[in-house]
Amino acid sequence: MGLSRTKTRQEPKVAPPTTLFLFGAHGDLVKRLLMPALYNLSRDGLIGNGIHIVGVDHNAISDADFAKKLEDFIRQEAASKVAEGGAEPLDPELWDQLASRISYVQGDFLDDSTYRDIGEKIKATGTGNAVFYLATAPRFFSEVAKRLGSSGLLLETDDYFRRVVIEKPFGSDLPSAVALNACLLKVMAEKQIYRIDHYLGKETVQNILVSRFSNGLFESFWNNHYIDHIQITAAETVGVETRGSFYEHTGALRDMVPNHLFQLLAMVAMEPPAAFGADAVRGEKAKVIGAIRPWTEEEALANSVRGQYAESTIGDKSVAGYREEANVAPDSTTETFVALKVMIDNWRWVGVPFYLRTGKRMSTRDTEIAICFKPAPYAQFRDTEVDQLKPNYLKIQIQPNEGMWFDLQAKRPGPTLDMENIELGFAYKDFFEMQPSTGYETLIYDCLTGDQTLFQRADNIENGWRAVQPFLDAWAKHAQVEQYKAGEDGPTAADELLQRDGREWRSIK
Ligand code: BG6
């Protein structure tokens, strides 16, 4: 299996010498994802001695203690993954090399003197290239950007670049996203802004474009003549954990749809870009997200379902409902599940519904795109009921079992004509040796090397919010939320959303 595959490889280069400032250095993102990703990049030889990693935060800590704190956390995490049979232990030599390039600037994000210290640090590292990674609470995004701008730290020359990475959430609705973009673009150019959506760092998400545009087969049926509808699911088994106060004001729609789910939708639905460069790819994505039909408030209500997980027992464990979670109001109407129907008004997709759903505390962790094809035009097989012909699906599973599967009908061996659904599949793990990774490696590397293809452009972000704004507006007036038991796949109203169209959700597995 897989032995005859041909390889088309590009050898990646070492990223240029850069000082990488991590704002929000004591936060979870830095220790859980960014530092492990930097370690993996260093393991793979993609960042060299020219990298300087500088934590920026308000707590006082020495360079050595900051590096040690990160090391302890990463070592422990790696060890527990080894105990579970995954990942590799931390390599002390490799870590020491990286640690020698870690330092710290103590400072308040709102204080101009912090930016003077950052300027001094850039002089001291001796490399003009700098990336400012805002791994902070969203309220600091525009404040930090303004101060980076006013202190001259965003000025580029022919000899060095200055880039800013912005984490999600990028705004909380259309007006706030437009305002944040305007604020950023006052102090820097679009080519300096790297808006992160970590879904774009996932191999399987990137593979959607490769599969579609490097295999001639797909294009012939990738349209409304052959595709009946598309389902995009991001099901999680976790609840809101410790993020109650964040989640209360966010909810499943804002947290997952205009960003992660729309990115998946864009990858599946966009037109082929003229080239694989950032402008062409992001231009096509902006167009397709911009073509999502803007529902009226009435249509938005009819085409959406909001759910909230209720207390339940999963296995032998009793699980709290959302309203019992820490920092959540006992009468909260925040949704932890959302199901939506959206239509794309363009030549390729007219008439093909896209059904999206995402939720916490569902039965299984599963992120997938299921493309449902129109049925065969006529069921001419003797002794076979027409309604036994199942539709063909192409399933692209993003996680946890990364790969692609085609559901086909096949004849069961034997003298009678019986049909059965079979799967034709490709699992990443069967073909490729995958090094442990966080998903942030590609994104950090691309930012250091100046490739914006996997980052969101201002128009991508605004088009995404424009498409979800009718749901936000409609729900602000009718905050109905249906309960579903923790461990179930959303409320029954979500099933009814598809049943009305004569369709059904694929089971989550
Ligand atoms: C984050 C959301 O952006 O994505 C979380 O804020 C969610 O609520 C997470 O759990 C899902 O990411 P992944 O990579 O686990 O699918």
Image (tube, rainbow, N blue to C red):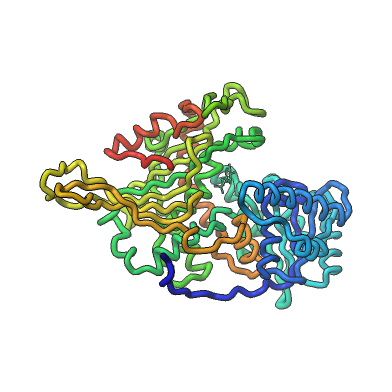
Location of residue 215 in the rendering, given as x and y in whole percent from the top left corner: 37, 68
User: Is residue 260 shown above or below 51?
Assistant: above
- Left or right of 134? Residue 489 is left
Asked if one can make out residue 37 in the rendered structure from this viewpoint, the answer is yes
**Residue found at the far top of this picture:** 330
Q: Is residue 314 or residue 288 the one in the foreground?
A: 314
Location of residue 502 in the rendering, given as x and y in whole percent from the top left corner: 27, 38
Location of residue 150 in the rendering, given as x and y in whole percent from the top left corner: 77, 59
**Residue found at the far bottom of this picture:** 158
User: Is residue 225 shown above or below 334?
Assistant: below
Which residue is depicted at the point 79% across and 55% down? 55
Position of the C terminus, as image quadrant, is: top left
In the rendered picture of this protein, how many numbered marks are placed on residues?
0
Q: Is residue 382 or residue 506 the one in the foreground?
A: 382
Which residue is depicted at the point 60% across and 22% down? 330
Asked if one can make out residue 351 in the rendered structure from this viewpoint, the answer is no
Location of residue 202 in the rendering, given as x and y in whole percent from the top left corner: 54, 56
- Left or right of 285? Residue 195 is right
Position of the N terminus, as image quadrant, is: bottom left
- Left or right of 329? Residue 470 is left
Q: Is residue 400 or residue 299 the one in the foreground?
A: 400
**Residue found at the far front of this picture:** 414
- The answer to which quarter of the image holds residue 434 is bottom right
Ligand 1: quadrant of the figure: top right
Which residue is depicted at the point 54% across and 46% down? 174
Q: Is residue 55 or residue 428 the one in the foreground?
A: 428
- The answer to which quarter of the image holds residue 13 is bottom right
Which residue is depicted at the point 26% across and 56% down? 226
